[in-house]
Amino acid sequence: MSDSEDEGGYIDLRELYSEPIISRISAVGGIEATKLADGSLSQEYKLGDECLGCLKDLKKFWRKDDDDPNRTVARILHKSNVLINDLLPVLALSVNRGAAGDRIALAATDLISCLTWPISIEEEFKELVDREEEHKVANFEYTSFIQAQQAYKLAIVKNKTVQHFLEVLLPRLAKSRLERTQRDDQVVALILHTFRNILAIKDTDAHPNLQSELIEQMHSFEILSLFNTLASSSDQRELINYNVVVLEIFHSIFRGIRADDLTLDPTKASSAGLSNLLEVESKQKRLNSRSNTSRHSRFGTTVSVLSGSNRFVQSRQSAITATGDQSMDVGKKKVFKRAKDQDNSGEVHLSNNARKHLKELAETFIETSYDTFFTTLLKDFRMERPKIRETDKARWFSLSAFFLEFFNTKWRRKDISKIPEAEIEKAVGSVSCMVDPTTVGYVSARMALTVDDKPPSWKELHCAINCLIQILLLVDEMVRCTQAPGIVEIAEVLQDKLYYSGDVMDVVVMVMGRYKDQSIKFLESIVHLAYVFLRMLEKFSKSKAYMFVRKRKSSKRRGADDMNEPNMQTTAEEEAEFQRDTPSVAEHKFMFSSYERRFATETIVKTCLSYLERHLEFHSLDQLKHVVNLLYRQSVRAQGEELFYKVSTLNTFRIVQEQVVKSAVNYHSGPYKDLMKLIEFILKKFFKAATENPMLYVEALFPIRSHTRSKGTIEQEDDRKTGLSDDDDNNNKFDPEFPDAAQTSANKRKKRSRRRSENGEQVERTARQEQMQSYLSAKFIEDSDEDEESLQEFFKKEEELRDRANKAAQVSEVPDESLSLVARRRKVREVEHEIQIVPETQDKQDNQDNQELITQRSQSSPHFDDEDAGISQTKLVAKRRRMIDSDEDE
């Protein structure tokens, strides 16, 4: 279809619908002049005779937009202004007017809910692309819809229509479960969605206080208390179907509000926000003060710079104070970087009364509804009920993090040492669902899934990160409650399970390395998460003598030779048994220093530097503290200062130093002092290394490889996969704190080489090493292709030898009869080797002596009796010789 035909089809459709829709709107009702008793005239709205039928016809026209990508009916209704002129007066006149009036009120409410339904331009266009109808759209303009909805919200607030919605809702909620019909449930859902729609409409610059007025009206009509009641009773059967829409309502109420500001007094909160803005503005002014021209800028300035045989002339006043390269760079063409994506949920400025009401609502919600409400929602998420959408999970993360931040901020300002144990248990019990291991596991699992999505869901990941941060801070506050041993024990157990699984540790590193061009708030959240998690993990690991974590490993597979054997049939039961015998995880000793080195990578360093560049925009010194702490761990603790040996990084440090000095902040104490010391430390390291290796200047200009220290202080990429002790090759192979079996299994996976002294001679093995070697030899032979008869005979003898070796391990010398067959055979081979290097003049006599020695040692063992000296001894020695030769070749 051509463009003209598309345009013509669009115009014909609009002309087709306009006349019947306008006629139905005019028949709904209208304003009439009524004569009063005193003879004056008043303008009143009168319902039409066919008001209910016309409202139903308008709803039928609305459904035609389901198949119309141009939203023709919606545009006609918005242009006619039917909500303000007709629907609101009809609802006010029909409520509480009997059964007939009730039907008219429901029909009007249904249309109001449709007209105020939130519009997401991104989702609208995505739906068109999925339906492959974007070519049919004649107009992608949605701003008129948003402006119309803002006008609807203004009219609803002025007419106090929320009171009429409440009058329609309460009779249905008052019914018991047995009395309530399906239509009553639909009416309750309709009214709740209408509340959600009105709260979701954002304020305009012309009317910035609409949300505040709406919240005050809802508080005066006890609607906010009704929302809290629905949340606290969400586990009941008759109200569980409304938990998702209640989640959206609370999310719209607290959207764009800082939890820490809400805990303050309303008057102090507004002044604090204003002071933060003024402080940021003053920093920027002081920074630009030196580069500004003087008040005598009408006088010209010419500066001539002589550099060798070249002369440069600068005709600007800034050339006096600036350096030569800076003054010359002014005239160059600037390359503008793409601005960082700002979060759409900007801060909302509410009135003092509205903040007071929301503070009371938040306190009541935490005490009565938090645990029940979020537990039921999490259960619905896990069961994947049809009412759950992907956006609901992001709202769950965001809202739970908001209330947890509100709780943590208030709790942090109290003197915990003076709070009784019963009050602490009651307070923590109100948010106990968030310290459950299943909840923390769900949060970390969703973080990993959102990152792996194509494309990744960055908004949901951002909300999940904020939720995990507040959970960790809550656990940290619980550890401080020393007068409540039960609370401290719960926090210790949760941390043990959290770190033992290892999933959260992997997710934190992965998220820090995935930052590219997301929003500034996202960057702030991931830096805060890394700071809190590393601080808590370090504190917990130091409090424990030994800490173990699980490390995932690939399951053992059958060898290729086994799979190619003929007549090999594998049933499902045998396969399941094989999988059970090969676990996918194993316990390992945790080393915090190894895990800390996983953050010393180029991608994570780049993330931290991107955040440091915006230090002038920080609203708190804690933000600077977080990033400085991470840079310190990377450069000093992990000894990864070479990661900063780049021209771009060094230039960033120079710019930061100049900005700190020019902004006149106190950089002699606090985080700014730590920042300046850290920069000086890295610069000294760089120039010291450059004097020893001048090629470092070239590498700084062209960083084509990943910097790693030659001394091994920064591990390679493969070694940095886990923060486990077994990643370090320098660990002792025989740790006295570990069981022998664990050490044996660890050593079995590595290639073993014969120990030799510095001069090349073989070192004599100790009793414990002979014991280990005998055990490994037995296990190696057990896995080989021996015939059944020889294996059974060998196992009997080897079992007795192990018992004797265990007893002999306590002494320095091991009797020959306690050694295994392989160990004795190795000594025999050593004697044979000595025989071969004897001079030819003594060959005959020495060979006879050595042969007698071999015969005596073979007969000294009680296991080598006359019966074993026959065929079985010859058979075993021949086969063991081949195995020993192959072992030594490896």
Image: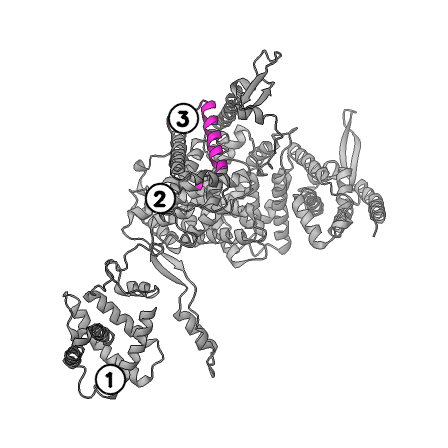
Camera-nearest label, 1 or 3 = 1
The verdict on residue 204 being magenta is no
Q: Is the C terminus in the top left, top right, bottom left or bottom right quadrant?
A: bottom left
Does 410 sit left or right of 834 as displayed?
A: right
Real-space Cα separation, disc 3 to disc 2, in angstroms: 34 Å
Reading the image, the residue beneath label 2 is 478
Q: Is residue 828 above or below residue 113?
A: below
Real-space Cα separation, disc 1 to disc 2, in angstroms: 68 Å
Camera-nearest label, 1 or 2 = 1
Q: What element carries label 3?
A: loop
Give the amino acid at mark 2. Met
Dot 3 or dot 2: first in sequence order is 2
Front residue (pair 240, 378) = 378
Rendered location of residue 464, percent (x, y): 50, 47
Q: Give the range drawn in magenta.
A: 643-669
Front residue (pair 479, 667) = 667
User: Which mark, by number, is residue 873?
Assistant: 1
Give the amino acid at mark 1. Gln
Q: Mark 3, residues whose alpha carbon is within 10 Å: few (<14), some, or many (≥20)?
A: some
